[in-house]
Every structure is written in structure tokens, then in C-alpha cells.
Image: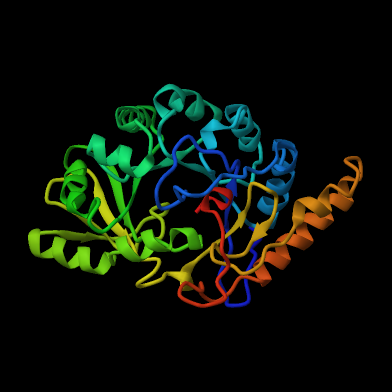
Amino acid sequence: MKKIIDLYGRQISYFRISLTDRCNFRCIYCSPVSKKFHFIAHEQILRYEEILEIVQVAAEMGMIKIRLTGGEPLVRKGVVDFIKQLRKIKELEDISMTTNGYYLSEMAHSLKSAGLDRVNISLDSLDEEKFKGITRYDGLSKVLAGIDAALEEGLTPVKINVVLLKDINDDEVEDFIKLTIKRPLFIRFIELMPTNHQLTEINKGHFISDLTIQQEIKEKFPDLKATLMEKGWGPASCYYQLPGAQGRFGFITAVSQHFCARCNRIRLTAEGNLRPCLFSVRELELKRKLREIPQNKVELRKKLIKQYLRAAVKAKPLSHQIGEKNISEFDMSQIGG
């Protein structure tokens, strides 16, 4: 199997693709209340055919794990048929999706039948009022139904992403952990990450270190068992399991204790730019160049894609720049987290 290695010896095998910047939620750590949204124009969003073309080349180079993100990927029309086409790329070993779960209850069966392997579901509160306060949307019951549907259809392991927010949902950590007792869920507590300067107040006022929460949980549950990492479990540094529980929980410390040394991914934004790191200060404008080459010039297009993918991998930094003055400002909905 071919491999693509960056300048620091990391094998880049994971390609995260944002299908859209649209989302039905307006989460407080992603969408400032004061901000007027300027969505990417429809014609500037990568077409499915273009994404398939790029993924085919990436897979041939050794990027054999794909994650579809947004915005909310399930709001884009034609996503099921797109996954069917994606599944035809023989080099791909894993196709997953990060979703807010709102449409999963009605789409889980179709997604699984199309070839989707598994899902990560974003869920920051189990309390209806808190959920509405965080997402600015009344949808908790549908997300919970989506989790049930994902388990039933075998979109597993089903991972629940919980962004920890001090004084908002940090009192629910134990409730989330208890979800793992009777169901094979993987709960991941994720540190709040700074992005847009309009979110500075949220970032400063509600950041809490996962390390603090970990210590509290270990004191509360002294019989916790640390479990070995397995393929597909993601960037959590360690997973824990309650005695007799079906599921597990872990912590993603992107800010307080980054995992850059083992990062194996690059990103394709909804607008068609390659982003070497979530917190990169640069993007490579692949789509703009690709659209300058006629569709029938297949080899030229393939050569360009390969050139840009290699350049993106070469540009991948040793570690992210959270806390640095020159960190780029961006909207998470356009990149896919």
C-alpha cells in the first residue's frame, strides 16, 4: 500500500472533507449571536463530482480513511448517493461522518446501505433547555432518536462528541458517562477551541481543561479501568470504562495537551481549499486551479490534485498554533472541525 509521509515522519492517511458550511444549529461556540452569516455561494461549493475526483487521487496516494463533515453534512442534498459513489473507490478502508444527529433517525438506514461505516454525533447537553441554549435549536429528542438509529443500523462505533463548557454543561459529565453503562457508546469530552475573534468571550468565559475534569472523574469513580486504544477510536489520549459498562469515555485535550505528534490528517474545506492543519495560517486553493483545467483533461487534473495534496502534506506544521498571535481566524462550519 502506498504511503504519504509529512516532513515530521507522520503518515497522512486521514482526509476530512467538509461538504457544506450550512447547518440547522447555531451553536454558541461556533456561531456568534452578533454575526450575520455569509454562506459560501452555491457555485463556490465543491461539486460532488469534484470531491470524488480529489478523493480518488488521495486514496491512491494512501489516504484511505475519509470523514465527511460540515457545517452539517446531512443538510446537503444528494449526500446518500454521494456516499454510494465514494464507496466505489476501492482503496478506501473507512468512511465516517460527523453530524449533529438531527436527521439521523430518518437517514441512518439509507446511510448505512449506501456504505457509511460509522458516525460521530455532536451532543453537548442531555437537558432540553440547556440543549436549546447551546444550539439555539429545539432538537434534543431528535438527536437522541438519531443515536438510537445509528446503533440499530450498525453505524458503529457510535461516538458522542461533547464540547465542555464551564458553568454551562460541565455539571453533566457524570450523566454522559452513565450513558455508557447500558449502551456501547464512546463518549468523548472535547476542550473548547478558539476560532473566531467574535467568540472570544465564549472561549475565555467557558473554557475548562479536560485535565481538571479527568481528575474529578477519577476521584468520583476510583474503580475506573483504562482501556487500550483500538483502530478508529480517534484522538482521545485514553479511554476509560466503568465496571460492567458496555461503552467507554475519553478526553480530547486539543488545547491543554495537544496530540499533534500523532496527527494523521489534512482537510478539504467546503470551498475547495486544502488545509494542512485545523489551525493553519494558510490554505491551498485547489478548487480554483482545478476549475481552470477542462473536464476532459483527466491526466492533467489528476496531476494537479496530486501536486496540491503533496504540497498540503508538506505544509503540515509540527503542531498547532493555539495561543499564538498569528493564528488564523476561521469559521469552524466551513472547515469541519
Above or below residue 312? Residue 186 is above
Q: Position of residue 313 (x, y in %)?
A: 65, 67
Q: In front here: 21 or 244?
A: 21
Residue at 19% over, 49% down: 172
Above or below 180: residue 227: below
Judged left or right of residue 173, residue 115 is right
Q: Is residue 265 above or below residue 100?
A: below
Camera-side residue of 30 and 111: 30
Count the marks: how many?
Answer: 0
What colour scheme does the image use? Answer: rainbow
Picture quarter containing residue 220? Answer: bottom left
In this orientation, does residue 59 appear?
A: yes
Q: Is residue 97 left or right of residue 282?
A: left
Residue 178 in the figure: left or right of residue 187: left
Nearer-the-camera pick, 303 or 167: 167
Task: Report which quarter residue 25 is drawn in.
Answer: top left
The location of residue 215, given as percent across then percent down, is 17, 68
**Image location of residue 91, percent across then percent down:** 63, 47
Task: State the image coordinates of residue 290 (x, y, percent, origin top left).
Answer: 82, 50
- Residue located 54% across and 66% down the image: 279
Query: Can residue 302 be seen in the rendering of this structure?
Result: no
Identify whether 126 is placed above or below 146.
below
Q: Quadrant of residue 86?
A: top right
In the rendered image, the quadrant that contains the N terminus is bottom right
